Image: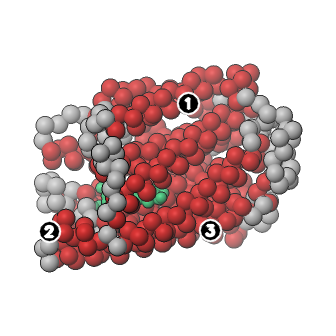
């Protein structure tokens, strides 16, 4: 670790791991409910479990992105984070607001709009917290010695994500308008500004891991980002087909969203080409594995499986079914989950000075989660296609169809178990790395020995 304040990132990474573990618990609760074993229903009804599952997802990814910024920005702009104590407060506030929101969902305190369920008073606290974060990172870049394209792409993505949270906070009486602007948040995040964050993090990782010239990598970053916005902004129309918005969106949404996979294909080709071109043999092979995995799985989940239901002729039948869940899982995991995991895999040896990445555990974690997620996607796909056929084409009753689908959720649970075991290995590895400590290049250990000097992150951060 080159800069002491980079260790603030560890707090966010550890938070990500915890929240993700909890997200998976709620995934299992829902999967069992789908199988007919809904014993927790009186305490955690399906809708509450779903809101917790998806909001925890957004929270742990945002926590990962913030950690990524605290880790990457000092190295890119070559200076310490400007207000490390405030950064620790910002982290604590983020956790507190998140925990209150999640507890609230269990008591029906929410707004009931998918992904944006957080109640309004808490929304304002989120705004304050995110503004603080954006301020700290912004001033750091401003005062830094080197505002690189990578740093700017990452920062711009985070700032725009914060700005785009606001349309979701406007109150509308009309359901159509409410839905219309909800998509500005949900779609323009994952198919717009988060891709900037992804571009920034990927380019940082590729610069470090492959040794390809920054100039070359950053030139391609412009092309990918340009294409993302060209297709992604009007691509929002693929959510406007049948919600009461004007008919023009059928053609606009269809055409532009059909182009979106090209941005993800570009990202995948970018990663693979740079890894091949680069001459550097970086010792952290696991980080490269996760980086390339992210490039490929995001294209498959977001690009390929997104395209599968983006045309209005198809979406007319698949809208809001398990086909959406099939795509949602692989896209979110492939693009953003694996991105955060790649960065953590890269950062942990640097933060802790322990080169544990030479062990096999992290590799197993990668393959078990990857195969597990492919299998989960398959289970959702089979259930989804069957649902579309029975419910939408032959007109069977929704609940009768749900009964008929129960069997497919055995498959989902099996696949999810494999995925979760892989994740557990990743967490064991994360814990074995221990706490961050300054000084020294990563050295190889297999067990992250306890005699290492352990440093309280808050205290260290305060020194900076
Ligand atoms: C990493 C990028 C992406 C992520 C994380 C993602 C995730 C999701 C999620 C979670 C949903 C459900 C949202 C909701 O109903 O509230 C959704 C819906 C949808 N996505 Fe994506 N997506 C991504 C990229 C794409 C791309 C590139 C396409 C098109 C090529 C696409 C096409 C669609 C369509 C058509 C729907 C609506 C499904 C419906 O009508 O029920 N997605 N996506
Ligand atoms: C233990 C593993 C998991 C299980 C068993 C699981 C199960 C489920 C189930 C049953 C649903 C509800 C589908 C419905 O509405 O009927 C769901 C929704 C969702 N899950 Fe998971 N999940 C798991 C892990 C994940 C992971 C790793 C991610 C992303 C990184 C994720 C993202 C989502 C999203 C975005 C939705 C909403 C999809 C939509 O809008 O259609 N889940 N999950
Ligand atoms: Fe979309």
Q: Tag on residue 91?
A: 1
Q: Earlier in the sequence, mark 1 or mark 2?
A: 1
Ligand 1 lies in which image quarter? Answer: bottom left
Q: Kindly tell me whether residue 259 is visible in this rendering.
A: no
Distance, label 3 to label 2, CA atoms, is 39 Å
Residue 205 lies, with reference to residue 108, above or below; the image says below
Q: What residue is at 66 percent from the left and 39 percent from the top? A: 10
Q: Disc 1 on helix, strand or loop?
A: helix
Distance, label 1 to label 3, CA atoms, is 31 Å
Mark 1 neighbour class, 10 Å CA radius: few under 14, some 14 to 19, many 20 or more? many
Q: Is mark 2 within 8 Å of ligand 2?
A: no
Q: Tag on residue 367?
A: 3
Q: Disc 3 on helix, strand or loop?
A: helix
Residue at the spot of label 2? 397
Distance, label 1 to label 2, CA atoms, is 47 Å
Kindly report which numbered mark, 1 or 2, lies closer to the viewer in this rendering. 2
Q: What residue is at 48 percent from the left and 53 percent from the top? A: 24
Question: Left of 412 or right of it: where is 209?
Answer: right
Where is residue 404, by image quadrant? Answer: bottom left
Q: Earlier in the sequence, mark 1 or mark 3?
A: 1
Q: Where is residue 5 in the image (x, y as percent from the top left)?
A: 70, 31
Q: Does the residue labelled 3 lie within 8 Å of ligand 2?
A: no
Q: Earlier in the sequence, mark 3 or mark 2?
A: 3
Where is residue 286, by image quadrant? Answer: bottom right
């Amino acid at each position: 670790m080159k800069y002491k304040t980079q260790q603030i990132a560890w707090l966010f990474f550890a938070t990500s791991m915890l929240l993700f573990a909890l997200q998976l618990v709620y995934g299992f609760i829902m999967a069992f409910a789908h199988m007919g074993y809904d014993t927790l229903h009186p305490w955690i009804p399906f809708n509450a479990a779903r809101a917790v599952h998806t909001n925890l997802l957004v929270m742990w990814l945002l926590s990962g992105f913030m950690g990524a910024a605290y880790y990457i920005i000092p190295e890119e702009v070559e200076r310490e984070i400007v207000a490390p104590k405030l950064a620790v407060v910002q982290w604590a506030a983020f956790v507190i607001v998140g925990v209150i929101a999640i507890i609230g969902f269990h008591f029906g305190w929410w707004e009931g709009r998918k992904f944006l369920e957080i109640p309004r008073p808490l929304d304002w606290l989120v705004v304050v917290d995110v503004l603080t974060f954006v301020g700290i990172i912004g001033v750091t870049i401003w005062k830094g010695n080197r505002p690189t394209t990578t740093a700017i792409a990452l920062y711009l993505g985070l700032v725009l994500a914060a700005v785009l949270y606001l349309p979701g906070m406007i109150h509308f009486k009309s359901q159509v308008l409410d839905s219309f602007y909800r998509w500005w948040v949900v779609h323009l995040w994952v198919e717009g500004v988060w891709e900037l964050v992804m571009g920034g993090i990927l380019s940082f990782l590729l610069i470090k891991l492959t040794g390809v010239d920054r100039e070359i990598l950053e030139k391609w970053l412009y092309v990918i980002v340009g294409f993302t916005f060209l297709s992604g902004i009007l691509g929002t129309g693929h959510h406007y087909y049948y919600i009461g918005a004007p008919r023009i969106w059928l053609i606009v949404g269809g055409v532009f969203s059909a182009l979106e996979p090209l941005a993800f294909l570009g990202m995948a080709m970018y990663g693979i080409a740079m890894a091949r071109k680069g001459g550097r043999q970086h010792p952290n092979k696991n980080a490269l594995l996760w980086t390339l995995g992210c490039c490929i799985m995001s294209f498959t989940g977001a690009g390929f499986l997104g395209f599968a239901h983006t045309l209005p002729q198809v979406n007319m039948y698949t809208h809001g079914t398990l086909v959406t869940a099939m795509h949602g899982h692989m896209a979110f995991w492939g693009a953003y989950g694996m991105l955060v995991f790649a960065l953590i895999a890269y950062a942990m040896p640097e933060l802790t000075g322990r080169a544990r990445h030479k062990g096999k555990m992290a590799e197993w974690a990668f393959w078990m989660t990857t195969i597990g997620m492919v299998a989960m996607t398959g289970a959702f796909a089979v259930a989804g296609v069957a649902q579309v056929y029975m419910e939408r084409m032959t007109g069977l009753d929704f609940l009768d169809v749900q009964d008929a689908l129960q069997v497919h959720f055995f498959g989902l649970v099996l696949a999810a178990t494999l995925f979760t075991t892989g994740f557990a290995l990743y967490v064991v590895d994360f814990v074995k790395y221990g706490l961050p400590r300054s000084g020294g290049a990563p050295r190889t250990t297999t067990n992250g020995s306890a005699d290492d000097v352990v440093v309280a992150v808050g205290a260290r951060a305060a020194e900076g």
